[in-house]
Image (tube, helix red, strand yellow):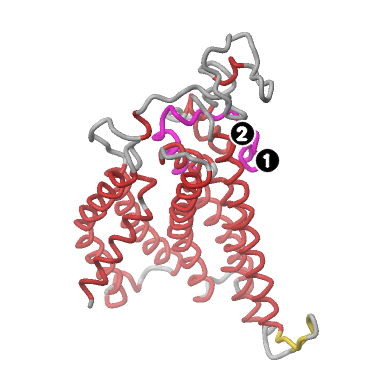
Amino acid sequence: GGPLGLQLVLILVAVVLMPWCAGGDSAWSVFKRSLKNVYWSTTIWPLMALAFGWLGSLNDREWYRRLTELQGACLILVVVGVVWILLLRALLVGAGRYVGPADGPAFRPREPLCDRCGYRITGLPLSGNCPECGLPVRESLPGGRRKPNDWQKHQFRPRGLIEAARLQWRVLRGPGFFERLPVHESPATARHFWWATFMLILLGTLIAGWAVTGALAVGGREYTREVLGARILIGLCMMLIPFSLQTLITFAACLWSQFRLGMRDYRVSATVCCYASPLMWPVIATLFVGCIGLPALGNSGFMGDRRIAFLGLQMVYGDLVALGYCCLVIGSLGYWATRLGRALRSVRHANV
């Protein structure tokens, strides 16, 4: 059953990665290209096996035993990070290449619609307004309210890093950002913004984790094995969790927008999901608190056998803390999904 199970896993990965492979073609074409791309990416598996096998043999090497715990943690994170980045490159770079026939939702002519309500504005004067919602016709067309933002203008310049950081707050602040976002121009620019968000999340959580675990260390001076393990756990989680969450919610958003909003071009939905990636910050913050706070509470004895009355039930402190933490995780995921749904609704009639 092993080979069959592996095939099913690869097919499942190909299905989930379909939005990353969107090239404007039909859903069936996207699935076939995604499946081929996942199969070709398995050529990097021997390198991954060598890297992890080498990490597993480090305890037998004299030079590794002479390293400090801090240096050992950095070595492990660098090797795992390089392997993970190479695997992502193998998956995503191939996914972003489309050389097939110009046949699909993105290649068919679109009838201009009102950007706000979807009314057909064909034949209306540019100086007029939409008879349904009153939005000026000119605002729904190129040169209207959907214009390139500062990130799209400066993404490959040093200023692009600053604009990426600023855009995090703009997306979190309110849904008005997506009412002015051009979504039919360059999906590659949206993917670049996702990578910038991913690096900001990774850098921010590593710095915060290093500072918090250092403050929790014995005497504030020693790096104990518990602190070292927590730092490695934070680094590994922040490499794996953001991309996994983004992939799953993008896949779900593309299906929802296709069947509920009629948006059959996955590139538009994927573009919105990439620009909505800063909505992941509350989820990451909740998971970060779990990686740091729950083990600390467990070591302190707070989550022992003590009981407390909650909603008429006698619950152990540990169960109550776990229940509250699960509610936080579900709430942060619900916030992300709700805001993403609003963003998708605001671009379903976009012409630009």
Residue at 62% across, 29% down = 116
Which residue range is magenta in the image? 168-196
Q: Is residue 182 magenta?
A: yes
Position of residue 105 in the picture relative to residue 348 (left or right):
left
Position of residue 5 in the picture relative to residue 330 (left or right):
left
Which part of the image, by quadrant, shows the N terminus? bottom left
Number of the label disc, if any, that sits on residue 213: none
Amino acid on which disc 1 is placed: Arg
Q: Quickly name the residue at label 1.
A: 173
226 lies above or below 329? below
Q: Could you say where residue 70 lies in the image, as x and y percent from the top left?
A: 45, 65
Number of other residues with Cα within 10 Å of mark 2, as a class: few under 14, some 14 to 19, many 20 or more:
some
Q: For numbered disc 2, what is the local secondary structure?
A: helix
Of 227 and 283, nearer the camera is 283
Q: Quickly name the residue at label 2.
A: 177
Residue at 64% across, 11% down = 128
101 lies above or below 168? above
CA distance separating discs 2 and 1: 9 Å
Instruction: Give the farthest residue toward the bottom.
Output: 305
What is the tally of numbered marks visible in this picture? 2
Question: Mark 2 touching mark 1, by CB under 8 A?
Answer: yes
Q: Could you say where residue 161 lies in the image, as x and y percent from the top left?
A: 51, 35
